[in-house]
Image (tube, grey):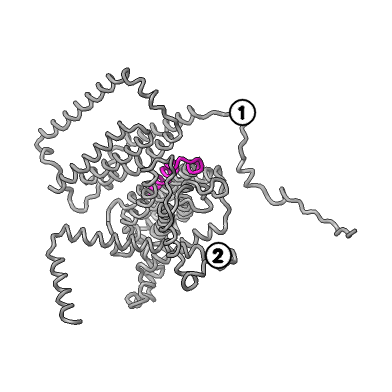
Amino acid sequence: MPEFATNFINAAVAWWLSLPGTVQYLGTTLFKITIVTFAVIICVAFSTYFERKVIGSMQARVGPNRVGWNGILQPFADVIKLLIKEVIVPSQSSRFLYVIAPLLSLMPALAAWAVIPMNDWFVIADINAGLLYVLALTSLGVYGVILAGWATNSKYALLGAMRSAAQIVAYEIAMGFALVGVLMAGGSLNIGDIVEAQSGGFSNWFIIWLFPLFIVYWIAGVAETNRAPFDVAEGESEIVAGFHVEYSGVAFALFFLAEYANMILISTLTAVFFLGGWASPFEGWAIFEPYHDLPLIGWFFGGGFPWLFLKMAFFMYVFFWLRATFPRYRYDQIMRLGWKVFIPVTIVWIAVEGAMAWFQVGPWAPTGV
Amino acid sequence: MPHSIVFYVFAAIMFLGALGVVFSRNPVHAVMFLVFTFFNAAILWLLAEAEFLAIVLVLVYVGAVMVLFLFVVMMLEVDVEAAKRGMTRYAPLGVGLALVMAFELVNVIWLRSRMPETGSGFKPTPEGYSNTEALGAVLYTEHVLAFEIAAVILLLAIIAAITLTMRRRPGLKVQNIAKQVAVRAKDRVRVVKMDAEKKR
């Protein structure tokens, strides 16, 4: 390295260290936020490509294959198309709310990432009430949908918003109860601690002891994000596109971004709460012990961010798989499933967990702590 | 000092939001102002290191209660003129209530400022202290009776609300989902075997 470069780096480091602690903290946090937000947005871009390829091959088509190698640059072409389209604000709309609604649906989808640990050291805010924070923020996404439907001043949009709001409110309860079960097993509201509680290989993951809650959480997550088969809010055969029927260009792109960011969030949360987050399934196997520190593939045995990413990608695949497989639920069936099936299942399983904790089996076994 | 600057900034914004609730003509806008006010209240609680209360405020009030408010307000055609007609009749009562509340607030603040132990402002909580845990520890042990009474009252409220609003319309057509689920292909489709017909 040339001398001036070394000098420059040294000077920069010295300048950074001379700053007050608050400024340093602010700087590193902003840097982390930028990294996570950027990564989520890139993931959103490529998951649209992933979705079209997966559904394409399930329907015996090729999917996008024109832009770049095998269509890999298709997401960027889509983004550019959306950015240069005109944003039309309906003349009878409530203008301010119409503009702010897409932002209100995107903001919670991105803000919830603050408490999600990517591996054993990278988390933006390691707060004690992390799980509550996630619940609180995911419950805010519904505002964007309702306001979009109302502010547009269109019948289809309002119908879509009403359906979506009723659905999200119904499934949020089942989701919250499923997380109560996770909380009981993990013994902490801190998401990092919940992952730590599942360390020690596949047999310690919560999916085994909390399997019904895992199913409820996952299906409720699909319903929360308004994805097929729960996409009555968009229901293109009845109400065109639901709440975002009058949105175009960038405003629509924000809704799109929020939907996919929410899907990635739900996938990651499912991985974190039930599949051990960044933990490797081979953790704690004595024969793999020596390989934990291998340079490039050590994570495969010892755990790390790639495992979280793989688990997240698997759940994203399940999202697309469901979409290609199932027909849309009818509205009354959605309500029945949420209120009469999921909520009783979660309540019963919480009681079962109480019994398990009393008899000290599963995650509550005295040796497994 | 930056702590109190942040406090005053958010308190001022919260106050403006509360004014917006009262003065906006459109009920949906009023509900959104209320949401905004709740958010700022949550921030003030965070500043007081009461993170559990702050998050629960957002979770329960913003995430659930206000969504239902918005739902109802959007569905109703609120007639602002009709609401204004009662203004002169209800104004004295409203002003009286406001004065009583203001008196109580000032009284509490004044009394608190006179107390030696709390007059010096907030003491920062010790490292590793989680008020979620602290609340949970007393809620289910010391105050378990009050907690359960609250739960029973809520259950009663739910049952009362359902019985008050439930109505059975005669001749209503509904699907019997159990019946639909139990349907098998042989109930609906009849496979008929017949010989191929000759072309004429």
Q: Is mark 2 on a helix, strand or loop?
A: helix
Residue B39 location, quadrant: top left
Question: Residue A346, percent across and down?
Answer: 46, 48
**Residue found at the very far top of the displayed protein:** B89
Circle 2 residue: A56
Left/right of residue B131 with respect to residue B167 in the rendered view: left
Q: Residue A49 carries which label?
A: none
Part of the protein shown in magenta: A138-159
**Callout 1 and callout 2 share a chain:** no
Question: Residue A287, percent across and down?
Answer: 39, 76
Question: Residue A117, percent across and down?
Answer: 32, 60
Circle 1 residue: B170
Q: The N terminus of chain A lies in which quarter of the figure?
A: bottom left
Vertically, is A308 above or below A334? below
Amino acid type assigned to the residue bearing label 1 in the image: Pro
Q: Quick check: can you spot residue B32? A: yes
* The one of A54 and B175 positioned closer to us in this rendering: A54
Q: The C terminus of chain A lies in which quarter of the figure?
A: bottom left
Q: Is residue A104 magenta?
A: no
Question: Residue A333, percent across and down?
Answer: 56, 45
Q: Quick check: can you spot residue A187? A: no
Amino acid type assigned to the residue bearing label 2 in the image: Gly
Left/right of residue A229 with respect to residue A113 in the rendered view: right
Subunit bearing disc 2: A
Chief secondary structure of the magenta portion: helix
* The one of A270 and A55 positioned closer to us in this rendering: A55
**Residue found at the very far bottom of the displayed protein:** A2
